[in-house]
Image (cartoon, rainbow, N blue to C red):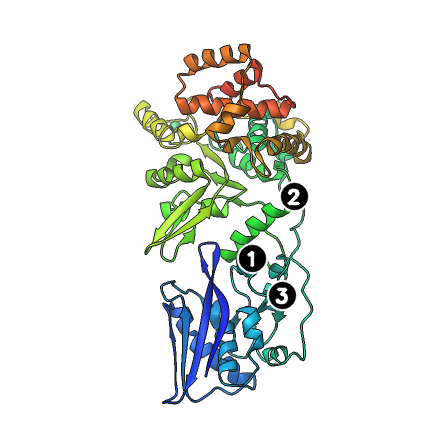
Amino acid sequence: MLAVAQTFALVGVEARRVQVEVDVSRGLPAFSIVGLPDAAVREARERVRGALINSGFEFPMRRIIANLAPADLRKVGPGFDLAIAAALLVASGQIPGDVLESHAFAGELALDGGIRGVSGLLAMAEAGRGRLRGVVVATANGPEAALVEGVDVLPLERVEQLAALARGEWRPPRPSPAKPPPASGELPDLADLRGQPWLRRSLEVAAAGGHSMLMVGSAGVGKSLAARRVPSIMPGLEHDEALEISRIASACGRLAPGELAPRPFRAPHHTVSAAGLVGGGTPPRAGEVTLAHRGVLFLDELGEFSRTALEALRQPLEEGSVTIVRAGHAVSLPCRFMLIAAANPCPCGRGPDSERCRCGPAEVNRYEAKLSGPLADRIDICAWVGQPDAAAMAESPGESSAVVRDRVAAARSRQAERLGAGRCNAEMTPVEMRSHCRLAKEARAAIADQHAKLGLSGRGHERVLRVARTLADLDGRERIGAGHIMQAANLRKREAA
Ligand SMILES: [Zn+2]
């Protein structure tokens, strides 16, 4: 007898429909799984057998074939167990088959019959919306699936509950949806940054417009401390953004049970490969840029990253998405992130002005060339960070994150009105720039002046305009003034301490 259950395979951070066809027929007892399964899927045979026997079901001593269709899509991981078990129970006449027609199944089985949660449930529940009545999942995945409205969520603790569910004798209550994580009040606070008014201003402008930023300064001036405080000055997440981030975190197995994902802060080590940074591999995996979507990607010691890794960042920075092509399938992964990079002024980290610096001019030049390499043109703001003096260290704490965040949020809401929800000035297309960055006469003169002084490239010119747009937004002005242009140009100069 043949039975068909619905489930999903995860491709990148998206869910694709998969049908599990189980055929139980006469012949020598055997159990095979076909349809491009990986090792974990093939091992489903042992888990399904153990789970069914230990839950009081009968494991049919017949020829069993489970086919996962479409056959050209690679099936990865243990999430197909529950669908295979459900179809097998129907095909062997142990439970009625109606539930298979209206619901998808996703869960890993334990040998004792328990059901474990799987990655990517949020994407799966969304993919099922409108096409299926609901999803049968592990209890651990219930809150995540319940985030999707219009889909019936049936969380199960153990595989034996399938029998009562299929017979219509019992239904688990809908779980309450996952909740936002503890508020950003618990993030490290900008008040910890003593002195450094220029750096504070740069961070605020960067956060307000979603601009990429480079901090240059000797070791120990607080670059990393500053970067880690950027999420705390970014506005709270809209529900849709939180869902989007959570979908990615879930697909990558990083979502805490029962919680929505917070705004990401990713700080990969400088030994990261290009694939680790932007994604890749077989099957395609999300890289750091995707894990940082709608959050911050912090590259500390920028000069130490490999050139190939930094080159690979260019396309994601420009386009806000990465496309990975593997075996004829293209997977597109979102990656709108704020790049914050930090670099020492010279290889030893003390800075050429320091008496203890032993770096030769050639070494310093080579190091600077590396910094102004592949990414320099794509960085909107550059802040030179000096050592805070003793007086600054003794000052009372500066403005807290909450105060700065209010100004950033106000500037961002102006941008959202202009560009659409969730979008910011750093993402403006050339067409949007033409209509939203109109300059008054004196502002036009100011940018022509800066263009000559700084020797701006076409892209550099555009970046000054974007930052000026953000400065005007922080001021609550619709028009970009000459002052905004001057400040924006200053935010590009390394020496502007
Ligand atoms: Zn040095």
Precedes in sequence: disc 3 or disc 2? 3
- Give the Cα separation between the discs numbered 3 and 2: 30 Å
The answer to whether residue 355 shows anywhere in this view is no
Q: Residue 194, image x and y in percent?
A: 61, 29
Q: Residue 109, image x and y in percent?
A: 51, 74
Residue on which disc 2 sits: 184
Say which amino acid is labelled 1: Glu
Residue on which disc 1 sits: 126
Q: Residue at the left extreme?
A: 362
457 sits to left or right of 432 = left
The answer to whether residue 222 shows anywhere in this view is yes
Say which amino acid is labelled 2: Ser
Q: Residue 176, image x and y in percent?
A: 68, 61
Relative height, residue 378 to residue 284 (above, below): above
Q: Nearer the viewer, residue 448 or 195?
A: 448
Q: Nearer the viewer, residue 367 or 46?
A: 46
| Circle number at residue 153 | 3
Instruction: Examine the image and state in which quarter residue 284 appears.
Output: bottom left
Say which amino acid is labelled 3: Val
Residue at 65 percent of width and 51 percent of height: 180
Tag 1's secondary structure? helix
Relative height, residue 207 to residue 260 (above, below): above
On-image quarter of the N terminus:
bottom left
The number of numbered discs placed on residues in the rendered structure image is: 3
Q: Tell whether label 3 touches label 1 (CB within 8 Å).
A: no
- How many C-alpha atoms fall within 10 Å of the one at disc 2: few (<14), some, or many (≥20)? some
Q: Tell whether label 2 touches label 3 (CB within 8 Å).
A: no
Relative height, residue 311 to residue 470 (above, below): below
Tag 3's secondary structure? strand
Residue at 60 percent of width and 61 percent of height: 145
- Give the Cα separation between the discs numbered 1 and 3: 12 Å
